[in-house]
Image (tube, rainbow, N blue to C red):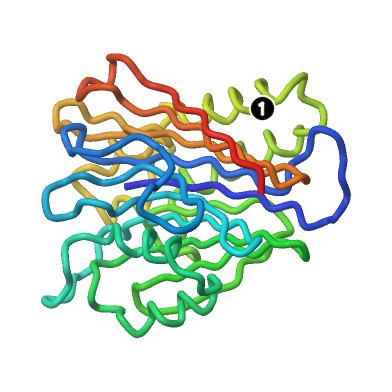
Amino acid sequence: MCILFVYVNNSGQRVPGEYRLIVASNRDEYYARAAEAAAPWEDCDHVVIGGRDMEPGREGGTWLAAGCCEGTIRIGALLNVTGEDHSSNAVTGRGPIVSNYLRGKLSCEDYSKQLLLADGAYPAFNFVSIELDQTGGAVVLHSSNAPRRIDRCNLEGPLGFGNSTFEVPLEKVKNGRQRFGAIVDKRSNVASRDSLVENLFNMLRSNEKYFPDEELSRRTPAQAEHLASINVRIPEAGYGTRTRTVILVDHENRMEFIEETMASSDPDGEWKRTELQREF
């Protein structure tokens, strides 16, 4: 389970305190699964920043990463779609979907079209790709579950993505999108950049349950109520939110990648914050 919220400002106006792009995301995973915190990827010939999966056999994959190639800022995010039948030919690791996008040079739409040819090679997923260039921004959703589709998202308001289809979002995605929207709508009125970042992280830390949820209960009947909050905590299963990420891109194309990740397998233990900045 994971959750992702995206706001793209395509107005072209440069209002103090506003950003071209705001992203807030949680990664939900088993606490003991090996991973590296966000850092620049030294094995890439252009700038890429993100965490890395270090699970044996899946090393190098990622759930969320950002970078810049030939003047275009690009972000890729992967969310599994639960409750779907898996092809008998599907590989277990979906992490290369994001890393291959960021390593390459294809546009988000061209990459998704290429990826469409490999549908069935991976368990069900939602792949969200974001691009910012001098003309504006684009967000593309590639959904591998039936019907397989590629959608260029409407950017008139904030977007939310989760572990179901875009047409039938989970309750926490719908409510989280409203909360995210309220935060980014006040972006020009916040006292500081720090206030904006902390408001976003507070949303990502929220344990409020949006339940009952008919779609979530249909997809994961045994764990639905435990998974009904933006911040997931199931300590008895050793599973939950273990990484929180905020990405900001301003009108000068300065990107901030801010991550909070568990320093151990204890969700009540220390969390490590990493802040990385790049100017493109």
Q: Nearer the viewer, residue 54 or 234?
A: 54
Q: Residues within 10 Å of mark 1 (few under 14, many from 20)?
A: many
Residue found at the far top of this picture: 269
Q: Residue at x 80, y 33 (%)?
A: 17
For the residue marked with disc 1, what is the amino acid?
Leu
What residue does disc 1 label? 196
Residue 88, image x, y percentages = 11, 76
Point out residue 113 in the picture as x, y percentages from the top left corner: 46, 82
Q: Is residue 210 above or below residue 81?
A: above
Name the residue nearer the viewer: 253 or 161. Answer: 253
Task: Give me the residue at 34% from left, 73% from top.
Answer: 145
Look at the picture and state if 16 lies above or below 91. above
Q: Which element is circle 1 on?
A: helix
**Residue 199 located left or right of residue 14:** left
Residue at 85% across, 34% down: 16
Q: Position of residue 19 (x, y in %)?
A: 73, 42
Image location of residue 92, percent across then percent down: 16, 62
Relative to 108, 18 lies left or right: right
